[in-house]
Image (spheres, rainbow, N blue to C red):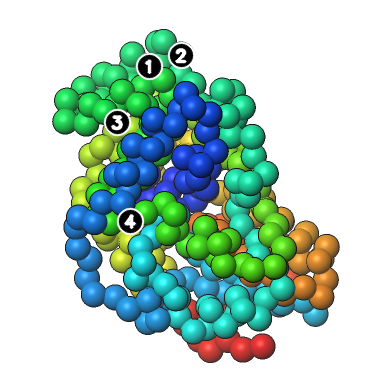
Amino acid sequence: MGEMMFQWTCCLAQTRQLNHRLKKSTVALLSLATSLLISVGGSFPAFSATTDNPVFFQINYQGEQAYLLGSIHVGKDDFYPLNHTIEHAFSASDALVIEADMAKADVPALLQEYGKASPKVSEQTQQVLSDFCPKNAQLCTAIAPFAPWLQASQIGLVRFGQLGLRADKGVDLTFVANKGDKPLYQLESVAFQFKLLSSFSTQTQLDMVKEAIKVSDSEMKGLINAWRSGDEKQLSMLMDDPESMSAEVIEKLLLQRNHSMAAGIETLMMKHKGEQLFIVVGAGHLVGRQSVPSLLQSTGMTVKKCHQQQCGE
């Protein structure tokens, strides 16, 4: 339990800023989600942001250098500033690269195309939510018109919010907010991510809803702690467990995107020669089989684990 939630929480950027980008007809949904995300319940083991050690890599290729940080798309104030190695690398970098730039997306149009549910699917989703909704009536009413994948995302964000973790404190959004005049590049797009999630079978989407509801608070905290400590083994187990996730999820949400991200990083490094890139993607893409770092290494790049050894200029 918990693995599927970690997949789409760690890997995707598509729903985190919706509350700032939607038309009036959907503001209720995300205003509610935002208010709940500010909840401060729950507790975690003591951490200091400066001693956190999330997965972080230095990449060198044909005279170019880049840094690659594994992120999580929710956060809290005590995540920041990150450790000195990460913060120094970011300060010294010339450009920021993220998965998807929400500012370039027409979110209302994407919601209309990919985020709505058919009457039949809505009925199936309500059956899955039958035990959850009596205690969460406002949320269920707000998300009812949407596809199960989007309902799962919103429920997941609300659940994290009840533990004091907010979408606007996510790692990638924090770097975007503090990038100053650094240019911002994207490896994918919001449209790509919407289309990807909507392409999952109805059963897979319903499983996402079930997971968002049933995962325990302790499991959710465990996900956060694995990210903060840079526990590659635990992160890999969470991301690629065929017993807990369908082959469709692993292949489309993780492995295929790992290959396209690795190719995108190489393209950006060659396109922007002379610029040191600071790249932030979901931590799940940086661990396990066919990870982005291993794929980059297979192309001849030198990849160093800065969370396990000293990295310098």
Q: Residue at x 47, y 71 (%)?
A: 55
Cα separation, mark 1 vs mark 4, equals: 28 Å
Q: Which picture quadrant has residue 146?
A: top left
Q: Which mark is residue 165?
A: 4
Sequence-first disc among 2 and 4: 2
Cα separation, mark 1 vs mark 3, equals: 15 Å
Quarter the C terminus occupies: bottom right
Cα separation, mark 2 vs mark 4, equals: 32 Å
The answer to whether any part of residue 121 appears in the image is yes
Sequence-first disc among 1 and 3: 1
Mark nearest the camera among 2 and 4 is 4
Sequence-first disc among 2 and 3: 2
Drawn side of residue 249 relative to residue 185, left or right: left
Q: Residues within 10 Å of mark 2 (few under 14, many from 20)?
A: few
Q: Which residue is mark 3?
A: 139
Q: Which residue is mark 2?
A: 118
Q: Residues within 10 Å of mark 3 (few under 14, many from 20)?
A: many
Q: Residue at x 25, y 44 (%)?
A: 215
Type of amino acid at the residue the image marks with label 1: Ser
